Image (spheres, grey):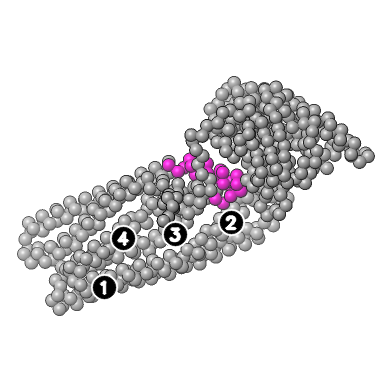
Amino acid sequence: MKSPAFFQRSELTQALWSFRREFAMVGLFSMLANLLLLSPTMYMLQVFDRVMASQNELTLLMMSLITLFLFMVMAFSEWMRSKVLVRSGVRLDNLLGARIFEASFEARLSRQGDAAQRAFGDLLQVRQFLTGNGIFALFDAPWTPIYLGVLYLLHPVLAGIALCFALAQAGLVWFGHRKSVAPAQAATEASTEARSYLQSKLRNVEVLEPMGMVHHLLPHWTQRYCRSQGLHGKAQSLTHRITAWSKFIRYAQQSLGLGAGALLVINNQLSPGEMIAANVLMTRTLAPIDQLVGTWRGFIAARAAFGRLESLLQAHPQRDPRLQRTAPVGSVVLRDVVAHAQARATPILQGVTLQLEPGSITAILGPSGSGKSTLARCIIGVWPQVSGEVLLDERPLAGWDRRELGPYLGYLPQDIELFEGSIAENIARFGDIDPDKVIAATRSAGLHEMVLRFPKGYDTPMGEAGNLLSGGQRQRIALARAIYGRPRLVVLDEPNANLDDAGEAALVHVLQELRTQGSTVVIVTHRQGILAAADRVVVLRNGLVERDGARDAVLASIRNTAPAGTPSPRLLAL
């Protein structure tokens, strides 16, 4: 017996299952619309076999009015099912948009760039299929047997012909599905690769253009682009062949059905009215299957998008909203932390063990490539491939809700990124802006007077201010963002890389304030000026802790072991 977990629906399937009432309404309106599609057939039978024989104008008028009324009801049913699906599509976006937004960021953090970039494209693909002609074809297809039954009542031969053509169309759909999945997926992947390559180079155009590198990259992009176009051409060629065969079957059905009906009329087995009505009904019988042929490619794309979204949400489950944590004190413990990276056999960090106490300032030193920035990312929990333990207040860092923990963390990365919005919004992390906290953060970073000199002050958009800011000023804004709200754990990666003497003095002042308020501070640096503010120094080399202890003791140890004539402590960066 299968376990209950076997029957559990995935998060995405549960979201779609919540629309079962809407799909039931669509099915009801589809039933009404398909039943009323028999109206033209019945009207033709009455006109040809009764009205024209009796030449009764009143009967023709009444039959025409009744048929027009049924057409109006059919049009209303078509409109209502379209309206229900459109509203369901909007509701689906509202239901999954925020969830996919968060999961895509987590996927990007886990180095799953492709999944993050196309997540909303996949959601759009699923929504368009669920609200387009493809879903109508699925709801209309079950009515094909009913139309066949009506044809059988007119004459079994006509039903047999329609059944043969229906099976031929269904076989074409199956063949197209079998043959098109792999080419379509290969074309999509190649197109994504070419687009990603181009976007990555456009982001670095200021480096590529001055050094004349653009034309050197053109052949690399052309190779990817031509491969993508070739695969798309093969997939489209297959689609066109299937469409051509579908048209052949449809036209052959119309002509042969009419010919068979005429033969039955000649043999007095069918009336002329029944012949015309049967031909129209036969066309309607094959319409849903023909529509499936036209939408099978969209179905394949939607199914693939659904699978990717399902994998994304399963890989990054929603955190329990009932989980509440008290405000962290800031005590950090790392036990045997090993950090890996893709396409690298040797770990970046190899069993790092540290304990960081509140109110302390720890400087991480070491040569380039020793793992300093990786260690900083492990401490704040944004390095994806980590083994060992990273604890905040004796709880695993991965177990904290980021929305809850975020205000208590401050992080300044090497690559400064300021986002679209005002200066105040950037410093306040795009949350509710507390003017007092914003001003306190900018005063600590030595920015307050500079910001006031802008025409709009703190409301100056970053798009406008970004062109006026130097690298050091941008770094100080990012520093103000990192210390906004007095966080309990602050990690600064090369915070003085672009600072002048005034900026470095402001940074030292910030560190002193953080120590006073009891924050746990970690600084990654190559410059010796900031070491005066540190209580503790950790030296990394080749992913291992080479030295760890009080600042003066570690620096003295380095001076004693440094070769003669080597400047100290600049030795640490060599």
Q: CA–CA distance between discs 2 and 4?
A: 37 Å
Q: Is residue 524 visible?
A: yes
Query: Which residue occupies 25% across, 57% down?
Result: 34
- The kind of residue tagged 2 is Glu
Q: Which residue is mark 4?
A: 141
- Whole-percent x and y of residue 527? 79, 35
Query: Disc 1 marks which residue?
Result: 161
Residue under pointer 2: 193
Q: Is residue 471 magenta?
A: no
For badge 3, the amino acid type reads Ile
State which tag comes first along the sequence, 3 or 4: 4
**Badge 2 or badge 4: first in the primary sequence:** 4
Q: Residue furthest front?
A: 1
Which mark is on residue 300?
Answer: 3
Assign a secondary structure to mark 4. helix
Say which label, 4 or 1, has the lower sequence index.
4
Q: Which residues are magenta?
A: 95-115
Answer with mark 2 or mark 3, whichever residue precedes in sequence: 2
Q: Main secondary structure of the magenta part?
A: helix
Q: Earlier in the sequence, mark 2 or mark 1?
A: 1
